[in-house]
Image: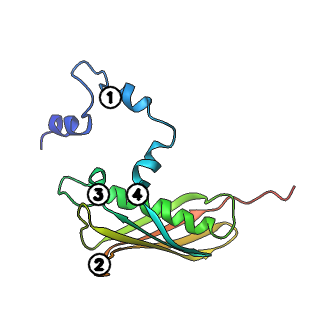
Amino acid sequence: MDLETVKKYLEKGVGADGDDKNASIINGMPSRFFENFIMQGLHVDQIEKGRVLCSMKVPPRLLNAGNFLHGGATASLVDLVGSAVIYSYGGSTSGVSVEISITYLDAAYVGEEIEIEAKALRVGKTVAVVTVEFRKKKTGKIIAQGRHTKYLTVQSKM
């Protein structure tokens, strides 16, 4: 691909005059829209301290160009569901991301039901580490595995 084609790919909403054609729509979206966009349809099946099990049917809005669950949506779910596991320890914050990694092993298609299981490996005073596994609900086949490390802010004792 030449550089101009790459630029056009990234600037889909920007016109030749430099105006962002989607700016008014995007700026008019509610606060925290992205989390709702990703998590709508997510059901919590089980929750306990250190473990959260969710399920959802893959919606069309989360598909990539290949018509299967987008890797970015998967990464966002690792972040969001993984953070819920940290909250299950009773804290008021889930911290900030230090590192996140995802291994993609299979695809999930529109309408397919998946399970998302998050487990805490460690939740300490300043660092939390969680794993998040995505499986096809019908077969148990692993779709993706994520690992997320977060820095937990130290609570003031004053």
Q: Which residue is denoted by mark 1 in the rendering?
A: 22
- Mark 4, other Cα within 10 Å: few <14 / some 14–19 / many ≥20: few
Residue type, label 4 = Gly
Residue 132 x %, y %: 44, 72
Residue type, label 1 = Asn
Going 27% across and 27% down the picture, which residue do you hit? 14
Precedes in sequence: disc 2 or disc 1: 1
Going 15% across and 37% down the picture, which residue do you hit? 5
- Rounded to the nearest angstrom, the CA distance separating label 2 from label 1 is 39 Å
The C terminus, quarter of image: bottom right
- Mark 3, other Cα within 10 Å: few <14 / some 14–19 / many ≥20: some
Are the residues at dot 4 and dot 2 in contact (C-beta closer than 8 Å)?
Answer: no
Q: Which of marks 1 and 4 is in front?
A: 4
Indicate which disc residue 70 carries: 3
Going 49% across and 64% down the picture, which residue do you hit? 81
Residue 95 x %, y %: 61, 58
Residue type, label 3 = His
Precedes in sequence: disc 1 or disc 4: 1
Q: Which residue is denoted by mark 2 in the rendering?
A: 138
